[in-house]
Image (cartoon, helix red, strand yellow):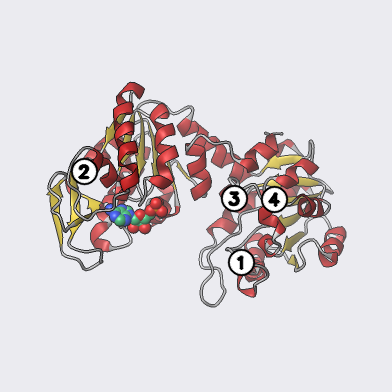
């Protein structure tokens, strides 16, 4: 895969697929500009070479054209962060866009309207991809967050740029860091998987059995595994149809040389509410009408010790309902343990919206080796899948 530094873009028009899918507040203003900031190095490199940038992205999940999801909303922030005037083409690949692209001069930026206003984007439509491709001379994909989608702007378009396509800095560093943990991780390699559902992470668990020495399963997922071992889980989250599968995974782990770590105590609640009554119990003492909503203090300590004695750590998904204070301690403890391990020389990789939010809340986001920006895309890489957006750059 070629990366952005393999070319010089002097006098070239470069189509950059970025991930500018930022959250907007009620007034339609950018609520968090992280994604725009992470796209800047790629934009700057092209402009500094003496090229121009045609920026493309999606925003939200609009059903057709919808002002609420217009990329116009990000213009002021984009202009401020790049320090340049940014032109805007409302018709994506229509006459206005074609004229503006044709008139674009070195050092200038043109932003196209939300690609998903055109239904052909998500279909990976070839005609739409060609229309986009005709606007520029090179294609650079920097949108790791959508690299697992085979959309027109993330995958199909690449075929129109033989020898003139590359990964942007963000996409390239995401791939490099995830591979570093997954394929080249120094042992012991530990993965911590949390979140609500086993079903959404089954492929990840199975692939990680081949890649890790220790696999901690926390969050809502833990109870399906506990049930598979025959313990009572009360009203905790359980995916009944996956209990057998969980059993299989637990049986298979020793052959794979992976130790599966399940919580040894829990914070339980009498109902699913932030002001529920809570207790701390050992893993085999969840009463019938209570539910586990976080890992307990003993498990927090165990996981922190395991993290600190690892050379490589991969973390995705919260250990409990961390959105509610009484059930946030487990997730916060993991965030802090990762930061401390990093300082001790461990390579730490974290990703997924909730884990990133927890790292921010714990104030340790800058103390992790690599924080991935792509939730779904990171999970698919952890699953061992080939991402369409990356494959298209390699072909
Ligand atoms: P996911 O999208 O699968 O990564 O799940 C994230 C969600 O899992 C978060 O919103 C958490 O509140 C939730 N979660 C974590 N632990 C539990 C639990 N023990 N019971 C119910 N929900 C949980």
Question: How many angstroms separate mark 1 from mark 3 (CA)?
Answer: 16 Å
Mark 1–mark 3 contact, CB under 8 Å? no
Tag nearer the camera, 3 or 2? 3
Q: Residues within 10 Å of mark 2 (few under 14, many from 20)?
A: many
Say what secondary structure mark 2 lies in: helix
- Name which residue lies at 42% across and 52% down: 356
Question: How many angstroms separate mark 4 from mark 2 (CA)?
Answer: 45 Å
Query: Horizontal and vertical percent for residue 2?
Result: 70, 35
- Name which residue lies at 33% across and 23% down: 257
* Residue 62 image label: 1
Residue 210 lies, with reference to residue 360, above or below; the image says above
* Residue 299 image label: 2
Ligand 1 neighbours mark 1 (CB distance < 8 Å): no
> Which of the two residues, 370 or 148, is positioned nearer the viewer here?
148
Query: Horizontal and vertical percent for residue 312?
Result: 39, 32
- Name which residue lies at 44% across and 54% down: 353
Circle 4 residue: 124
């Amino acid at each position: 895969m070629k990366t952005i530094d393999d070319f010089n873009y002097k006098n070239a028009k470069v189509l950059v697929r970025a991930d500018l899918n930022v959250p907007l507040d009620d007034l339609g203003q950018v609520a968090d500009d992280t994604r725009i900031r992470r796209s800047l190095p790629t934009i700057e490199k092209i402009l500094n070479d003496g090229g121009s940038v045609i920026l493309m992205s999606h925003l939200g999940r609009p059903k057709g054209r919808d002002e609420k999801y217009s990329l116009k909303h990000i213009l002021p922030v984009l202009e401020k962060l790049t320090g340049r005037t940014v032109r805007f083409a409302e018709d994506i690949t229509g006459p206005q866009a074609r004229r503006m692209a044709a008139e674009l001069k070195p050092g200038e930026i043109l932003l196209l309207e939300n690609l998903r206003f055109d239904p052909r984007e998500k279909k990976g439509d070839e005609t739409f991809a060609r229309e986009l491709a005709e606007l520029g001379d090179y294609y650079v994909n920097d949108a790791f967050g959508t690299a697992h989608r085979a959309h027109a702007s993330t995958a199909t378009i690449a075929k129109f740029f033989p020898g003139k396509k590359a990964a942007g800095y963000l996409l390239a560093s995401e791939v490099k860091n995830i591979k570093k943990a997954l394929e080249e991780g120094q042992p012991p390699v530990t993965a911590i998987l949390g979140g609500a559902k086993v079903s959404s992470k089954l492929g990840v668990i199975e692939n990680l059995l081949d890649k890790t020495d220790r696999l901690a399963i926390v969050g809502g997922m833990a109870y399906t595994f506990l049930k598979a071992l025959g313990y009572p889980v009360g009203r905790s989250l359980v995916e009944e149809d996956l209990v057998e599968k969980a059993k299989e995974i637990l049986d298979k782990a020793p052959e794979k040389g992976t130790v599966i770590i399940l919580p040894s105590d829990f914070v339980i609640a009498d109902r699913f509410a932030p002001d529920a009554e809570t207790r701390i119990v050992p893993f085999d003492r969840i009463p019938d009408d209570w539910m586990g909503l976080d890992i307990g203090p003993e498990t927090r300590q165990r996981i922190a010790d395991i993290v600190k004695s690892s050379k490589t750590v991969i973390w995705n998904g919260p250990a409990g309902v961390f959105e509610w204070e009484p059930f946030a301690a487990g997730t916060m403890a993991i965030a802090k343990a990762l930061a401390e391990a990093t300082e001790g020389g461990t390579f730490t990789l974290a990703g997924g919206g909730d884990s990133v939010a927890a790292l921010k809340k714990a104030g340790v986001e800058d103390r992790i080796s690599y924080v991935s920006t792509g939730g779904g895309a990171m999970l698919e890489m952890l699953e061992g899948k080939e991402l369409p957006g990356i494959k298209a750059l390699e072909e």
